[in-house]
Amino acid sequence: TKLPKGPPAMEPRFHRFLADHVVALVDEFQPQVLCTTVWAFAKLGIDHTELFKSVTDHISGIVIDTLVRFTPKDLSRITRACAISQYHHPELFKRVAQAAIHLKDEFNAQHATDLLWAYATMGIEEQIFVSFAPIVAALLDTATIRHISTIAWSYSIANIDVPDLFNVHFVNQVTIKCAKKNVGVDSLSRLHQWNLWQTKEKMRPGLQSSLQDSCYKAFTSQETHPSKFQNKIVLYLLSIGVEPKEEVVMDSGYSIDALV
């Protein structure tokens, strides 16, 4: 099914028009088109719950023999879209994991990164992390530091430890890639979180000390934004005569919202 002609694409009403059309005819669209549609809506920050429900329900109902015909790009896009929009659909993630594991040898660094980030972000500890570890290891030499740092962060957030992946070769690749050119603050911050997880929780050697320092500085340099919940807690403490210290940075680099 082709997308219909509608109002100019720059207008918000076009997005509603498009979403409503997809919802009404979801069974007539190619699944790959549906994956791309919800990914585009998520990337643009457009909230349309009915669209996400319709598409994710539809894809979750596809038999596995058909689902494995999806490309790694399709599978990573649908899960990433849900993660960006914080749309929870456990059955979808379960079915996609089955297909992704079947197709894991076809994933490149970008699609593997997006997929694992989505599962970690949504707090879904699927077998996918263990299954993808050999694939990630094989991609280390060609992956960018952004890919590697995001994957490392994903495993640490999911708390899935794979010693055969996070070994000396992994640390060496991180060191080499960080030395080649300027590395973004986001990548260094993610590596800091992975390094804490490895050294403090798993009691293993981490990054080289000089790189640890760079990662720590990047992590603590990021601006914090108090949440509405944090503001409510602080206001309550003040109302009962307690004056907390806010955003207290600990030795780890993490901050405590309110310390009394």
Image (cartoon, helix red, strand yellow):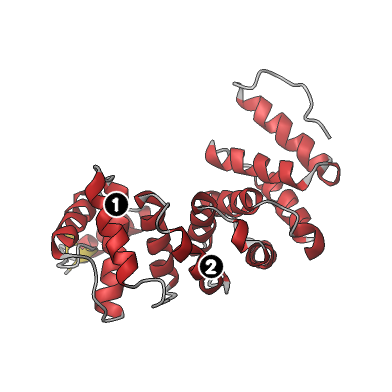
Relative depth, front residue between 252 and 136:
136
Describe the element under mark 2 as helix, strand or loop: helix
Describe the element under mark 1 as helix, strand or loop: helix
Residue at 43% in and 63% down:
154
| Mark linked to residue 258 | none
Residue that numbered label 2 is attached to: 132
**Which quarter of the figure is the N terminus placed in?**
top right
- Residue 131 x/y as whole percent: 56, 72
Residue that numbered label 1 is attached to: 177
Relative depth, front residue between 52 and 109:
109
Q: Amino acid at mark 1?
A: Lys
> Distance between the Cα atoms at labels 1 and 2?
22 Å
- Residue 86 x/y as whole percent: 54, 54
Q: Amino acid at mark 2?
A: Phe
Classify 10 Å Cα crowding around label 2: few (below 14), some (14-19), many (20 and above): some
**Which quarter of the figure is the C terminus placed in?**
bottom left
- Residue 42 x/y as whole percent: 57, 42
Mark in front: 1 vs 2: 1
Q: Residue furthest bottom?
A: 203
Give the mark count.
2
Classify 10 Å Cα crowding around label 1: few (below 14), some (14-19), many (20 and above): some
Q: Quadrant of residue 69?
A: bottom right
Does residue 173 appear in the picture of this structure?
Answer: yes
